[in-house]
Image (cartoon, rainbow, N blue to C red):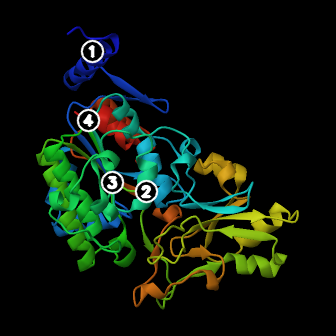
Amino acid sequence: MTKGRGEVRLFMNRRRIAGAMENREILIEVNGRRYRWPSRPVVAVCIDGCSPDYLENALAAGIMPNLAAFKKEGFFSWADGVIPSFTNPNNLSIVTGVPPSGHGISGNYYLDSQTGAEIMMNDPRLLRCETIPAKFAGAGARVAVVTAKDKLLGLLSHHLFTGIRFSAERADRCTLPGNGIEGVPSRVGMDLPQVYSPELSYFVLRAGVKILETHRPHLMYLSLTDFIQHKYSPGTAQAAEFYRLMDAEWGKLADLGAVVALTADHGMNDKTNPDGSPRVIYLLELLDLEFGGGACRVICPITDPYVAHHGSLGSFVTVFLFNRLALVPVMNFIRRLRGVERVVDRQQVFFEFELPPDRVGDLSVLGDASTVIGTSPRDHDLSALGHLPLRSHGGLAEQKVPFILSRPLSGAYARRAQTERLRNFHLFEFALNGTM
């Protein structure tokens, strides 16, 4: 039977893409940057909450042999994530290759200044650009996106109409039409994990290994959860065991022939007073006392459906001013508060932190390494912490994250890594374009 024009075009496109696996002639452009078609599978992993100290402690203890091999044989460095150092803006930066000013996701939560509604930023309609996995899938690549928590799935799989996409949280609900895979728990060999558990991250990594074995995707993105990092500091037995088990799965991915690319969305720090109590600035309460009730509104962008770890307290908030309240007096008042590291206006937050100005307040306030900022005590429930210290993120102190590749960089990219500011959202570019 003679092929129709559409069938011929599809056939030729598939041949062209198949050839690209050998000669890397195809370049896929996403958000102004070109990416090579991978000659081997690329698996990018976002280690949620991974401060440099976790890896340094584990390497010193000799419990991460695969990471040690990546450091010796591949590329090992630190990079800057985006501010606020929260989950959503950083994950979306990693999968789009651009800062929040490009993709539009300014936090986990924001205030729509036009309607006055407070909105969870998990709706893919809020995304303002394409993702790298979706663009590759549209060109014919086999792609997989696996997240720990379901809140991220819609954003990370936006316009990903083919391939595998699911969350560990709801892995038991996967269907072939909706997720590109079914029977996930039995395939992985694990029961469905609890959301607040280290097993949620193990499930994602083990699913990644199984998918690489059985589906051989060209591109895979695995996003973990920071349950351990919120509860346990570097050097503790619980943290050591978590990183040891992750290392074993990274080794399996590398042994299956993948370029393993590791980074994080943010770090994590104790936010405590010397006596171990939470060190909190209840900013709205203080602003109400100084400028009158209703003059300001404080939004905590760390807020998401999973607040047991931190009670919606992070080191970045955004402040809206009403009743023609002057900007400078409010800035000066906030700057004098103990524990505040930076206060920037809407213009500064765009130029310095690359945030979309229409999705932040008149002011953005950053706490220091040991301070979180909230609204008032009644709005933040910390009862779930129990005896553990409050550990959280969001500020400049949590911006430094790992940037690791299992294979060495080419000369040009090795030089770039030495001379340019490395960002976590450069991960796909370095893995696809720069590894040897």
Looking at the image, tell me whether mark 1 or mark 4 is earlier in sequence order.
1
Indicate the amino acid at tag 3. Phe
Task: Pick whichever, 287 or 269, lies toward us.
Answer: 287
From the image, tell me which residue sits under label 3.
166
Left or right of 136, for residue 155: right
Q: For the residue carrying disc 4, how many other residues have a C-alpha within 10 Å: few (<14), some (14-19), or many (20+)? A: many
Q: Please name which of the two marks, 1 or 4, marks the residue nearer to the observer.
A: 1
Label 1 to label 2, Cα distance in Å? 35 Å
Residue 81 showing in the rendered view: no
Left or right of 73, for residue 234: right
Looking at the image, tell me whether mark 1 or mark 2 is earlier in sequence order.
1
Q: Secondary structure at mark 2?
A: helix
From the image, tell me which residue sits under label 1.
12
Examine the image and state in which quarter residue 19 appears. top left
Looking at the image, tell me whether mark 3 or mark 1 is earlier in sequence order.
1
Numbered mark located on residue 435 in the image: 4
Q: Please name which of the two marks, 3 or 2, marks the residue nearer to the observer.
A: 3
Indicate the amino acid at tag 4. Thr
Q: Quadrant of the C terminus?
A: top left
Looking at the image, tell me whether mark 4 or mark 3 is earlier in sequence order.
3
Left or right of 74, for residue 422: right
Tell me the residue at 53%/64% (across/down): 395
Query: Which residue is at the far top?
Result: 2
Indicate the amino acid at tag 1. Met
Numbered mark located on residue 152 in the image: 2
